[in-house]
């Protein structure tokens, strides 16, 4: 769970003119220096047919690249908060609507702590994988929330978002132009939507945090590419992590890959330390930055880049959580909790 840092027809004709002479008489030598009127008509028809076929193909390509206009995201009805059995261990912030301050405690673990982090991460990954199987047209995000909530408490864990700073649900569901922190509600998923599902579990006193953007039904190619590149950015960010590595390398490689594909990297929302505390130092910036700091073996934190097809600025709804792109264009996000090792990073939330 992220925290806030605070023209074509001319081209077709030109191609044809380069391949075929503009004057039919100029091709007479190919036919022994003469060509019949009937032959001229046949050739002209073939030439016109080729141009028409190319025009249709070009228009199809442009149509495929053109973003599908869809209705802006609107908030649906939010159902009452779901109960959690008394025997399940709850994080210290539960019971208060006040947003906890970012802890300056770095989450560095001994062998026992690492074992607990692996267990929490493994559960979060399984829950997220299950949630993804529910994504299809006509399903509401509220239904996804209920299923996630039940799976988490059945495992003896607590859904970390529930009650965090007053957040009313057990999972974040961010659809289309929603960058993050979408509140599950009665809105049905539509064919062609994309949805980020952000799962965090609190198991035996440790948080495991992960998210993934899923395709709902028949998603257009432009949005598929956005999702694919966002996942690649997460992978590239993780690949530079190891004991002694600079945190700013993460933002550098993510920005380079995103820019290569003409996507924006959201700078308002960042990754964070995770462990016994939900959100702590270090702050993980996904854009280019000059912030100092190096990774330490045994440390755990999240990397969770958000990429957009347009503006990286957002508008926050009146619920004080839902953050949508200010131009209404789609956004995608992927997230893992990782453990720093001597030679690299272990992904704790990999299913």
Image: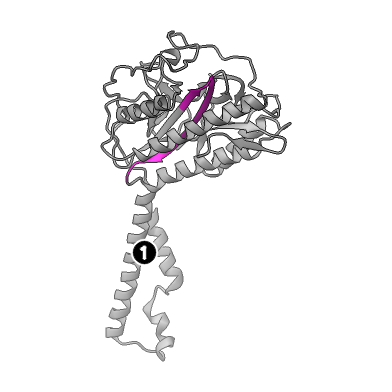
Decide whether residue 210 is among the magenta residues: yes
Residue at image position (32%, 60%) is 56
Dividing the picture into quarters, in which one does residue 300 lie?
A: top right
State the image coordinates of residue 223 (x, y, percent, origin top left): 41, 43
- Does the image show residue 246? yes
SS category of the residue bearing label 1? helix
45 relative to 255, above or below: below
20 relative to 185, above or below: below
The extreme front residue here reads: 87
157 or 40, which is in the foreground?
Answer: 157
Q: Main secondary structure of the magenta part?
A: strand
Q: Which residue is mark 1?
A: 54
**Dot 1: within a 10 Å radius of its alpha carbon, few (fewer than 14), some, or many (20 or more) residues?**
some
226 or 333, which is in the foreground?
Answer: 333
Residue at image position (42%, 74%) is 20
Asked whether, in this view, residue 272 is left or right of residue 319, the answer is right
Q: Which residues are magenta?
A: 200-217
State the image coordinates of residue 174 (x, y, percent, origin top left): 39, 30
Dividing the picture into quarters, in which one does residue 267 lie?
A: top right
State the image coordinates of residue 291 (x, y, percent, origin top left): 67, 24
Dividing the picture into quarters, in which one does residue 271 lie?
A: top right
Asked whether, in this view, residue 45 is left or right of residue 328, the answer is left
Asked whether, in this view, residue 132 is left or right of residue 209, the answer is left
């Amino acid at each position: 769970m992220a925290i806030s840092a605070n023209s074509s027809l001319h081209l077709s004709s030109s191609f044809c003119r380069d391949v075929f002479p503009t004057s039919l008489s100029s091709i007479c030598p190919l036919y022994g220096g003469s060509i019949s009127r009937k032959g001229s008509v046949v050739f002209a028809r073939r030439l016109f047919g080729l141009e028409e076929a190319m025009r249709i193909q070009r228009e199809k390509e442009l149509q495929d690249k053109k973003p599908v206009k869809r209705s802006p995201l609107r908030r649906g009805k939010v159902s009452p908060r779901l109960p959690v059995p008394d025997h399940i261990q709850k994080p210290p912030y539960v019971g208060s609507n006040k947003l906890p301050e970012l802890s300056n405690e770095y989450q560095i673990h001994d062998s026992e702590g690492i074992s607990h982090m692996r267990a929490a991460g493994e559960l979060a990954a399984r829950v997220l994988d299950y949630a993804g199987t529910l994504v299809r047209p006509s399903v509401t995000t509220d239904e996804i929330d209920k299923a996630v909530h039940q799976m988490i408490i059945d495992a003896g864990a607590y859904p970390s978002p529930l009650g965090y700073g007053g957040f009313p649900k057990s999972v974040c569901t961010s659809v289309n132009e929603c960058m993050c922190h979408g509140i599950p509600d009665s809105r049905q998923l539509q064919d062609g939507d994309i949805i980020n599902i952000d799962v965090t579990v609190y198991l035996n006193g440790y948080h495991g945090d992960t998210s993934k953007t899923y395709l709902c039904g028949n998603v257009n190619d432009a949005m598929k590419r956005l999702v694919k590149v966002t996942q690649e950015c997460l992978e590239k960010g993780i690949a530079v992590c190891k004991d002694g590595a600079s945190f700013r390398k993460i933002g550098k490689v993510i920005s380079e890959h995103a820019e290569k594909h003409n996507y924006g990297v959201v700078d308002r929302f960042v990754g964070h330390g995770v462990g016994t505390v939900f959100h702590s130092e270090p702050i993980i910036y996904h854009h280019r930055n000059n912030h100092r700091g190096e990774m330490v073996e045994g440390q755990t934190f999240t990397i969770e880049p958000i990429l957009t097809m347009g503006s990286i600025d957002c508008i926050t709804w009146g619920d004080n959580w839902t953050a949508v792109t200010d131009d209404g264009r789609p956004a995608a996000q992927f997230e893992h909790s990782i453990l720093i090792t001597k030679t690299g990073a272990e992904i704790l939330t990999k299913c």
